[in-house]
Amino acid sequence: MGLQQLGCSATSYQPNIYVLKPPKPVSSFNSHFCSRKSVISHVITSFGFLNSHLDGKRFRRKRELISIVASSSSSNVAAPFWDSWAPEKGSKAPLLSDIFWPSAGAFAAMALLGKIDQILAPKGISMTIAPLGAVCAVLFATPSSPGARKYNVFMAQIGCAAIGVLAFTVFGPGWLARSSALAAAIAFMISTRAVHPPAASLPLLFIDGAKLHHLNFWYAFFPGATGCILLCLIQEMVCYLKENYKF
């Protein structure tokens, strides 16, 4: 079949040819670069927002810290004059049982020590000494304070009493023995982390108490440390009664 029979000429026949053209390298690079540029700008913007947010938080934290320091410094300035002459802030009124049981424990302790004194009277020895009254106040009234720890009680009682005997042996009676013994007792309690305020009076009691001189270094264990054993036992009973019998 010829071309004339189909009703078309050779010159008018043009076949449909589809050619797949590759993408232009420049335009593809530009689009890729633009996409990467937008991502990078988005990341930079995000980091900028994050940095500004963190800077804002740091500024707020710094401002709060400055205000706290300022308030604490202002409160510390007023504390020595006003707060020390007023009850502790936020402290509640004690229950009747919180008053009764420590007082009853102190009465029982002094009664037992007095009974022991009657037994030891022929030997010229007494268990009722003034520092044990201060020990009762610490153990019964403030049982959770550092001075009421058993380690602090016995370490300070034994050490400070021995320091008093040593100071009296070296310096004899007088102001020099009292001063050096008290200074050494405080240094001993701080260095051993056994601060127990009533024990600081034991060296002074020995130096000024002629009836105790014959005990010599036995004074380190008697009557202070020995009396504290009895007081610690009574303290356990007082704490139990305070926790279980409230009124």
Image (tube, grey):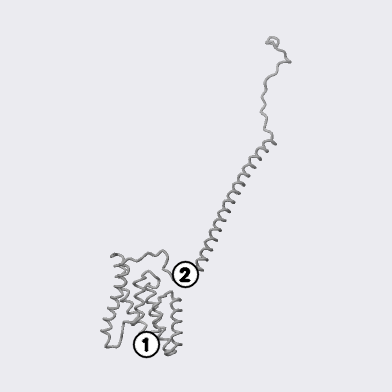
- Identify the residue at image location x=35%, y=87%: 212
Amino acid bearing label 2 = Trp
On screen, residue 7 versus residue 196, left or right, reads right
Where residue 29 sits, quadrant-wise, is top right
Badge 2 density bin: few <14, some 14–19, many ≥20, Cα 10 Å: few
Badge 1 density bin: few <14, some 14–19, many ≥20, Cα 10 Å: few
On screen, residue 229 versus residue 63, left or right, reads left
Horizontal and vertical percent position of residue 5: 69, 9
What is the number of the mark on residue 82?
2
Horizontal and vertical percent position of residue 119: 25, 84
Q: Of the two numbered discs 2 and 1 on the same chain, state the one appearing first in sequence.
A: 2
- Quarter of the picture containing the N terminus is top right
- Identify the residue at image location x=67%, y=26%: 19
Horizontal and vertical percent position of residue 86: 43, 69
Horizontal and vertical percent position of residue 143: 36, 70
Q: Residue furthest right?
A: 11
What is the number of the mark on residue 209?
1
On screen, residue 207 versus residue 17, left or right, reads left
